[in-house]
Amino acid sequence: MKVFMLGWEFPPYISGGLGTACFGLTKALDNLGVEVTFVLPRAVEGSYTSHVRMLSPASLLSQQGSPSLTKLRRTKIKPVDSVLQPYTSADDYSKRIEAILLAKRSGAGQAGSAAQMVGGLDYAGDMFAEVHRYAAIVAELASKEDFDIIHAHDWMTYPAAIAVAELTGKPLVVHVHSTEFDRSGENVNQVIYDIERAGMHSADRIITVSNFTRNIVINRYGISPQKIDVVYNGVERNGNSSKRPDEFGIKKNEKIVLFLGRITMQKGPEYFLQAAKKVIDEMDDVRFVMAGSGDMMHRAVEMAAELGIGSKVMFTGFLRGEQVQEIYKMADLFVMPSVSEPFGLVPLEALENDVPVIISKQSGVAEVLTHALKVDFWDVNEMANKIVAVLRYPPLGITLRNYGNSEVRKMRWRDAAVRCSRIYEEVLTEAVPV
Amino acid sequence: MASVCFYFQVHQPMRLRHYTVFDHHHNYFDDHKNAQICQKVANKCYLPTNRLLLDLIRKYDGRFKVAFSITGVLLEQLQKYSPETLSTFDALARTGCVEFLAETYYHSLSFLYSRDEFAEQVNLHRQSIEYLFGQKPRVFRNTELIYNNDLAVFLEEKCDFDAVICEGAGHVLGFRSPNFVYRPKGCNHLRLLMKNYRLSDDIAFRFSNKGWSQWPLTADKFAHWVNEINGNGYMVNLFMDYETFGEHQWADTGIFDFIRHLPGKILEHPDNSFKTPSEVVASYPVMDSVDVPHVISWADTERDISAWVGNAMQSNAIHELYKLEKQVKACGDEQVLTDWRRMQTSDHFYYMCTKYFSDGDVHKYFNPYDSPYDSYINFMNILNNLKLRTARILDEKRKVSAPASASLGVGRGGKPLSSDSSRQHKDLLPAG
């Protein structure tokens, strides 16, 4: 079985869950003997810097003994030059283009590849045009590859995937990790919605990361339920068992409640802060940490000040690797108040690090996690109630942590990969050439 | 001969209200939900089954007999939400063919945590039963058939009972049959009746299971199994939840027809009879003594108490609750005492059970919570409030009594106002 897989990002240079999921899935597929050619946009290093530092996977490929890649025997990574990046908006995109053009005009040599790509007649000026330009390049790349099936992750890859499917006649599976409704609420970007819809309708089969997302795909995109399978994400065990600070004999006098994720509408940061306010009114010696960055970061800082809890809320900015481990060691509780979360890997990561979790009922992960406290994201009173309970009644945290940790251990990427390869086989038997 | 000895457990807890850390009122119990469930169960189970049993007792002219153990917390609810049910129990009591057993008024685990409290609750229950049904219970059953040698010895020494009931757990019986009367180890006159769990569960759990090789279970077939006991035992102890009839096994499974035809089929055999637990004890000799050093119950396959105190939350909640006993009793507030006792009902701890939780399995009969965690949080929030409330009353009492005792040499706290629910409670007890 050979799979032509289209993604956006791949570890270690990732900014969100998609890269983690793609890595976990491809690694598990690799172990099952499935050959994957993974195509992703090669980010172009311009002078534009966002909160997320994206490096070219090309440099990653050149790194000797990169741990994530040496493990994948059958997986090939094919970067394609593009300024496409995950979790960007059309606005961000035009800023980035401007920055690159500026760099080009000032004659900065390192922007060479970007100049090639965006310069001259190729420069289309907006993200959507770039998505289509990218599709054309990928289609060309695909014509030189040998594979049985196309597997595309999220909307930016759909036009490329559709093009490859049309060109090669191979069946297409699209994998929905999130939809425009998760990202933008009711203010959907019509162009993105149209691309998503076209991808889903062109696909022979759709994989969603939860029933939560499956329902959105059925109700909002008009897809027949029979065409959609749910494949829950797994958890990549990193092996380093983190020691909690109390095991080192460190006594801290403050309880720490953690928010970790992009600070953006979808993740519900304002509900976290409203709940924090209620908790702080109820008990002392508690601190709230918001780890992450995003378009609502400034708003969140302001809001903490407005609520009069500025001194009790810490903003750490974007954390990675070691820093994430550190923050988990400090945390007594992790809260994910997402407004709309197709899956949500972070609570699993928290549990893996022995931090009990509160998750919103509007998340896919709530379908698979039983040993977690669950609240409606808007119910800040109940959220605060549960936060206080975990901090005040130690047996609650102990039970949640112990059972939750062993529950997470049972969620393997292997199972997700087995499900995927079964879906591939079904699609291939269905798609008998006429 | 084989005597069929039916005993039905009749109980509904007083479920707690959703109570957050931000709540400070003292209405801990969800009257609306409790009324709803009580009336629903009354209509589906208690009323139709009581009427059926009354018919059968009349039809067989006193040869059909049963026993009930009705908890105090349910009696209070029936009085409030379904007085009709209470009057049908009263009618059953008047037939002379129905025995009422004793248990802890609050369906509590108090035996394991406070012997004083246990004795008080047994007394409360005994008084209520005597007051309502004109019988002084002679046979005791502990909550969830929780039992060990210590319980038997305590009952013999401190309470006046003829027999105690327990689960006929395989590991306790060994080669012995549950179809005989036993003597608990360490006791002289107290008798032990053990549940025949195979035949009991055939009715209570397997009756409607189409995957069971014996399905459908008919009165004929069951009577045949009972007849097989002849010569190999004196009686069959069929102990089960009363909600089996119409609630666990819905009417459309044919459970009522089964019961309607059972007495006739059993009595077809001339050596068979129906007996109440007290009659069984009076009729048959002791076979052997049974040693139960460890605590057993009738729950799950483990037959232990892990369903109530198996995890850290349960153990914490129950210890915190009983830790409050001294203060609650010292503060002299009847409503506080009643609330504290109602919180002892075993169901509150059962809801916190994490066994089988991830399998989404049983353990959720009328469980008002989405998860064991929610149930623990709610319980602890209420317990916290009760703790503060008790401390406040004690504080005020101290302030009042300090100057008073200085001048008069007598210190007595102010009498608390009697609230609605404590009056309720008093209605079930003899005056004075």
Image (cartoon, coloured by chain):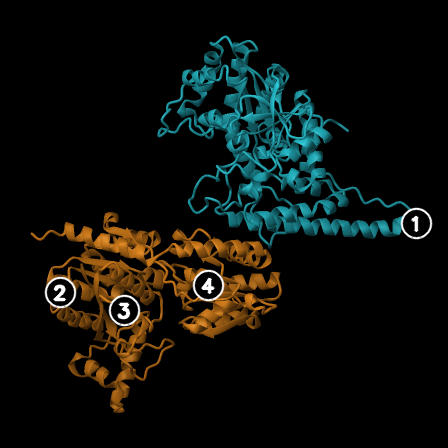
Chain colours: A orange, B cyan
Residue indicated by mark 2? A146
Inspect this view and state whether residue A357 appears.
Answer: yes
Instruction: Tell me if mark 4 has few (under 14), some (14-19) or many (20+) residues whose alpha carbon lies within 10 angstroms of its own.
Output: many
Disc 4: host chain: A
Q: Earlier in the sequence, mark 2 or mark 3?
A: 3
Residues B234 and A277: in front is B234
Residue type at the position of mark 1? Ser
Q: Is residue A214 left or right of residue B221?
A: left
**Residues at circles 3 and 1 in contact by the CB criterion of under 8 Å:** no
Q: Which mark is residue B407?
A: 1
The residues bearing labels 4 and 2 have C-alpha atoms spaced at a distance of 41 Å
Residue indicated by mark 3? A8
Q: Nearer the viewer, mark 1 or mark 2?
A: 2
Q: Nearer the viewer, mark 3 or mark 1?
A: 3
The residues bearing labels 1 and 2 have C-alpha atoms spaced at a distance of 102 Å
Residue type at the position of mark 3? Trp
Q: Earlier in the sequence, mark 4 or mark 2?
A: 2
Residue type at the position of mark 2? Asp
- Residue A69 screen position, x and y as percent: 28, 71
